[in-house]
Amino acid sequence: MAVLQLLVLLTLANSAPVAASHLCGDLWQQPIDGGLRLRDEAPLFGRSKTWRGLAAATLACALAAPALGLAWTLGAQVGALAMLGDLAASFVKRRLQLPAGARAPRLDSLPEALLPAWCLREDLGLSAGEALLGVLGFVLAVRLASPLLYRLRLRPRPW
């Protein structure tokens, strides 16, 4: 049950920023990095990593957690940590000079799932193996769902 709770929250954290973008359009789309560029001239995170997305993921998970039998604060932590993992992945992708939206299969979803699963495994009632199973399940689900989401135009194409 705990692995399923984690997977539901990770899925919400992953999809809430996309849903917020569709619902809000240009409203509140300020990038977290404020357009900052480092010495390599690449953005710190990129313009698609917004305050709106961070807030949407955190709020969606906080609202869903009680329905899953978890404290809303734990849900908010999962959402926020998932987005911090996503920011870390974006930071690495920018340092590797990958263009915005470029796919990097494991890097796109692994940090987003691993950070909350590992940091909150005890609070979620997960063993280390269960936390890693949840991470693997999320990475596989994202990998399998992405082509469908692009085809349905629910996610913007990276090219």
Image (spheres, rainbow, N blue to C red):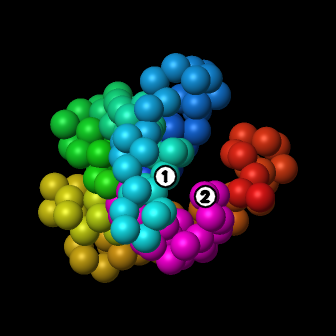
Left or right of 28 on screen, residue 156:
right
Does residue 45 show up?
A: yes
Q: Closest to the observer: 155 or 50?
A: 50
Magenta stretch mostly in which secondary structure? helix
Residue 68 spot, x, y in % from top left: 35, 39
Q: Which mark is residue 88?
A: none
Q: Which residue reaches farthest right?
A: 151
Q: Residue at x 30, y 46 (%)?
A: 80
Q: Are marks 2 and 1 in contact (CB under 8 Å)?
A: yes
Q: Residue at x 84, y 50 (%)?
A: 151
Q: Residue at x 25, y 77 (%)?
A: 128
Residue 58 spot, x, y in % from top left: 33, 37
Left or right of 69 on screen, residue 112:
right
The residue carrying pointer 1 sits among few (fewer than 14), some (14 to 19) or many (20 or more) residues within 10 Å by Cα, namely: many
Image quadrant holding the C terminus, namely bottom right
Magenta span includes 62: no
For disc 2, the marked residue is: 100
Residue 148 spot, x, y in % from top left: 78, 54
The residue carrying pointer 2 sits among few (fewer than 14), some (14 to 19) or many (20 or more) residues within 10 Å by Cα, namely: some
Q: Amino acid at mark 1?
A: Gly
For the record, the magenta segment spans 85-112
Nearest to N terminus: mark 2 or mark 1: 1
How many numbered callouts? Answer: 2
Q: Which mark is residue 46?
A: 1
Query: Which image quarter: residue 66?
Result: top left
Q: Amino acid at mark 2?
A: Ala
Q: Secondary structure at mark 2?
A: loop
Magenta span includes 111: yes
Query: Which image quarter: residue 140?
Result: bottom right
